[in-house]
Every structure is written in C-alpha cells, then in structure tokens.
Amino acid sequence: MNSSSQNSSEESQWNPCPSSPYGVQVFFVVEAVNLLFGLPVNAWTVWLISHNSHSIQASEVFTLNLALLECVYSLLSFLRPLNYYVIKSTSLYTFNLFFYGLLSAGRPLFQACVCLERYLGVVHPVSYLRYNSVRTRLCTLPLVWGLILSLCVCNIWKLVLAFPILFLLLLLLQAYCCVRILQVLCQPGPGDGTRKHKVDPAKKKAFITVLVIQVMMVLNYLPMVLVVPLRGRLSRHSYVCQLLPASLSFSVFGSFIQPLMYLMRRGKFPSKAKG
C-alpha cells in the first residue's frame, strides 16, 4: 500500500491529469509551433548580432539576450513531452519548472528593458545619449538575470503570486512608456507653428515597438494573471487540467515577434511586398 501510494504521488507530480490530458497536449502543440517558427528567427538574430562587422550596438544588447533565451528554451522544450510520455521523472519535472520560469520571467523583463530604452530615447533624449552605451547595458544585465533566476526558483517552490505580480508591474510600466511616447509624438516640435506637424520617423518606430510589445505582453500573460484568482474557486480538475494549461499556452506563444521586428529594422526581412 505504501509503495502504491508513493507511485501514485510521483505520477501526480509529472502527470496531474492522467484521465484528462487534452489541456497538456494543447500546451505541447503550442510549444511545437513556437519551436518551429521561433527558433529559426531567434537563431538568425543571434547570428546577425554576433557576426556584425562592427561591434555590438547598445540597442542590440537586450535583443541579443532575449534571442539567446528564446533559443535555449526552444531547444530544450522537447524535455517536457519527453518526460511526460517516456521518462516520467520527478527530478526532470522539477527541472522543467525551473526551465519554464526562465521563459516566463526572462521574456517580459527583457521586453521591458527594450521599452525603457525606447522611452528614454524619445521622452528623455539627453539622458539617453548620456547613458547610451554597451557598458551601461552590461552593468544592468546581472540585475536582470539575477531577478530571472530568482523567479525560476519561485516557480519551483510554486509561489503562484510571484509571476502575476511581475506581469502586472511590467504591464503598467510598459503602458506608461507607451502613453508618454505617444504624447511626445503628438506634440509639435519647435518652430512648427501652424504648419502640419511631421512625426519623427525614429520616434514613430519607437512607439510602434513599445505598442507591439505591450500588445504581446497582454496576450501572453494577462490570461495567467486572470486565472490565478480562480485557483480556489474552481475544482482542481478544471483549474489544473483545463484553465492552467490554456493560460500557459498563451505565455509560450510569440517568441518570434521581437526578433522579427529587429530583422525588419535591419532590412533582413521584407516589411512590404516588392512589386
């Protein structure tokens, strides 16, 4: 009886829904699609930045780290279905929790760093020029990666409120950046007078970048934020086997958006069809 109870307990850890696997299977399908589209684009981005004829630009530091993180996640994502269907190891399940925290914390944090870059460049250009160097970015990277790894540990300990709080804070931060950049774009420049106000193309690109990141942030992580308060109000089966895998599927998808924007900005990916 003790051995049977132990096996049942171990099985519930790596497979909490043996009688209803559809939610988990949908999550695996989304990860496979993310691997198919995200890995080539992110790998291309890493290759372009690291093989640049000139030194790495300051604006590429966070993009490079995000692309590397997405590549690592994509390459190791096969471990989750492998453990689910074949290995069935509690230790590997714990590693997958840490591994998923890497994406859940890393992507929004690096996206927030990109938004802050664009915000400073448009709203506070003097400060941006003063600190616009690779060295400044490298000084912030240990802080970002330290926070990412701390949140990975929180995911192992199943501190369910850690990630929703992070997502809400970053959503508010990016929304503020987006609104302030839009305000600057709507203000006429000096000497415009009554003439038609012309929008600075660089500022317009900054606004589009922040807006796209904000939309992706909402699509990726708002479902997870909305699901967490329902944890004690629904049955365990409905929450763990249906709602939770659905919200996690939203958080995984979209790894190709940020590198695709970078490639289009570099002219490596056509933004308009050529006639």
Image: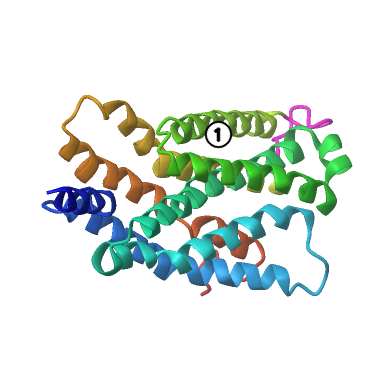
Q: Crowding near pointer 1: few (<14 within 10 Å), some, many (20+)? A: some
Q: Is residue 45 above or below residue 23?
A: below
Front residue of 34/163: it is 163
The span picked out in magenta is: 188-200
* Residue that appears at 46% across and 45% down: 216
Front residue of 117/81: it is 81
Q: What residue type is labelled 1?
A: Leu
* Left or right of residue 164, residue 15 in this image: left
Q: Quickly name the residue at label 1.
A: 170
Q: In this view, does 196 lie above or below 68?
A: above
* Residue that appears at 19% across and 35% down: 236
* Left or right of residue 55, residue 2 in this image: left
- Percent position of residue 140, x then y: 74, 44
Front residue of 37/268: it is 37
* Left or right of residue 171, residue 82 in this image: left
- Percent position of residue 175, x then y: 55, 31
